C-alpha cells in the first residue's frame, strides 16, 4: 500500500526522472499542486494530507527541476520555459495513471504563477479547475510590493535587466547567472531549499509582463485564496485585478500571511469546501 509522502518519479521529455510526492485520495479528482520560489514540496505535505485524507482529491506534489533533495543542478534549469515542458509531461503522466479523472491544477506563491503560465499552454484545455494560494504573477503586476515588505529574498535588478536585454537580442550565454538570492540565515534552513536561482529558472517561474493574456484564459472554476496580512504581495489588489480579466473566486483570509495560507486549519477547510463543491 502506498504511504503519504512516498516519492515517485515521472520521465520528462529529455529523459530526466523528476520526483513528486503522491498522496492517495479519491480516484475521480486529482490535485497537482506546485511549491514556491525556494522551497521544494516538503512544506506542502500537511496540506496535501488534509486534501487526500478528507476525501477531496488524490494529490501530486512535484519537486520542480532544480529543487528538492537531489536536483540535477540546484537552482538552475537548461532553458527558459523548461518547467512548462516538465509540467506538461507530469500532467500527461497523471492522465495516464488516472484516466477520466478531473484534474485540478495550482500552486502557492511562485507555484501559482508557474501554474498560471499553463493557461496559454496545451494542457490548459484539460484542466478542470485552478487552485491558487497567494499566487505570484509578473514583476509589473499591481500585486508587487514597492516596499518589498519583510521578504527574505533579494533580486539583482540590474543583472536581471541586463540579461533581459541580451535575451531580446537572442543572446542566452549568460542565462545561468544568479539573479535571485534567499538570505535566510543558514541555521534556519533545513537543507533542501534552492536559495540561489539562475535567471532562466527565475524567469520560468513567473508570467510575462503581459499578464492579462494569462488571466483572461481562466474560464475554468478558479479559487484564489490570499491572507489579508500577506507580506510578499498586496492582498487588496487581488480581487480587482482578477475580476478585471476573469471570473475567479477571490477570498481574503483575515489573520493570515503569505505562508499561513497554506498551513492553517481554517485555510485547509476553505480549500476543502471549494473542492467539495467542484465534485458536486
Image (spheres, rainbow, N blue to C red):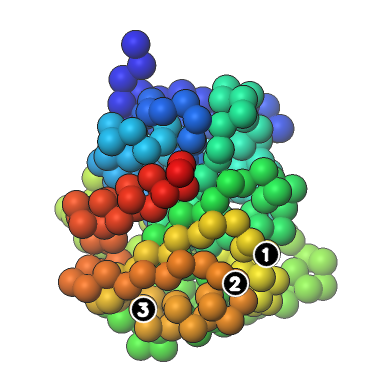
> Residue 207's quadrant in the figure?
bottom right
> Residue 103's quadrant in the figure?
top right
- The secondary element bearing badge 2 is classed as loop
| Tag 3 and tag 2, C-beta contact below 8 Å | no
Q: Alpha-carbon neighbours of circle 3 within 10 Å: few (<14), some, or many (≥20)?
A: many
Residue topped by disc 1:
217
Measuring 33% from the left and 47% from the top, which residue is drawn there?
Answer: 272
From the viewer's side, name the closer residue of 5 and 201: 5
Measuring 18% from the left and 71% from the top, which residue is drawn there?
Answer: 255
Residue topped by disc 2:
246
- The secondary element bearing badge 1 is classed as loop
Q: Alpha-carbon neighbours of circle 2 within 10 Å: few (<14), some, or many (≥20)?
A: some
> Whole-percent x and y of residue 227?
29, 70
Measuring 72% from the left and 77% from the top, which residue is drawn there?
Answer: 165
The furthest residue to the bottom: 146
Where 134 falls versus 54 (above or below)? below
Q: Distance between the Cα atoms at labels 2 and 1?
A: 7 Å
Mark nearer the N terminus (1 vs 3): 1
| Tag 2 and tag 1, C-beta contact below 8 Å | yes
Would residue 111 be found to the left or right of residue 51 on screen? Answer: right
Q: Distance between the Cα atoms at labels 3 and 2?
A: 17 Å
Q: Alpha-carbon neighbours of circle 1 within 10 Å: few (<14), some, or many (≥20)?
A: some
Residue topped by disc 3:
235
Q: Distance between the Cα atoms at labels 1 and 3?
A: 22 Å
Amino acid at each position: 500500500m502506498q504511504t503519504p509522502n512516498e516519492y515517485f518519479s515521472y520521465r520528462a521529455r529529455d529523459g530526466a526522472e523528476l520526483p513528486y510526492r503522491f498522496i492517495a485520495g479519491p480516484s475521480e479528482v486529482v490535485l497537482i499542486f506546485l511549491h514556491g520560489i525556494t522551497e521544494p514540496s516538503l512544506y506542502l505535505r500537511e496540506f496535501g494530507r488534509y486534501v487526500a485524507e478528507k476525501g477531496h482529491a488524490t494529490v501530486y506534489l512535484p519537486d520542480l527541476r532544480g529543487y528538492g533533495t537531489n536536483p540535477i543542478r540546484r537552482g538552475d534549469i537548461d532553458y527558459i520555459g523548461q518547467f512548462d515542458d516538465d509540467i506538461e509531461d507530469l500532467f500527461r503522466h497523471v492522465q495516464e495513471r488516472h484516466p477520466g479523472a478531473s484534474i485540478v491544477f495550482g500552486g502557492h506563491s511562485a507555484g501559482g504563477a508557474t501554474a498560471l503560465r499553463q493557461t496559454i499552454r496545451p494542457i490548459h484545455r484539460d484542466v478542470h479547475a485552478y487552485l491558487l494560494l497567494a499566487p505570484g504573477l509578473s514583476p509589473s503586476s499591481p500585486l508587487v510590493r514597492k516596499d518589498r515588505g519583510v521578504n527574505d529574498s533579494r533580486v539583482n535588478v540590474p543583472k536581471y535587466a541586463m540579461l533581459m536585454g541580451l535575451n531580446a537580442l537572442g543572446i542566452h550565454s549568460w542565462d545561468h547567472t544568479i539573479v535571485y538570492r534567499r538570505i535566510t540565515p543558514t541555521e534556519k534552513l533545513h537543507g533542501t531549499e534552492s536559495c540561489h536561482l539562475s535567471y532562466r529558472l527565475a524567469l520560468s517561474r513567473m508570467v510575462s509582463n503581459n499578464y492579462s493574456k494569462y488571466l483572461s484564459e481562466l474560464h475554468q472554476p478558479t479559487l484564489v485564496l490570499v491572507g489579508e496580512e500577506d507580506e510578499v504581495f498586496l492582498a487588496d489588489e487581488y480581487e480587482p485585478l482578477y475580476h478585471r480579466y476573469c471570473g475567479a473566486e477571490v477570498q481574503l483570509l483575515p489573520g493570515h500571511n503569505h505562508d499561513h495560507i497554506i498551513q492553517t486549519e481554517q485555510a485547509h477547510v476553505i480549500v476543502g469546501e471549494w473542492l467539495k463543491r467542484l465534485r458536486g
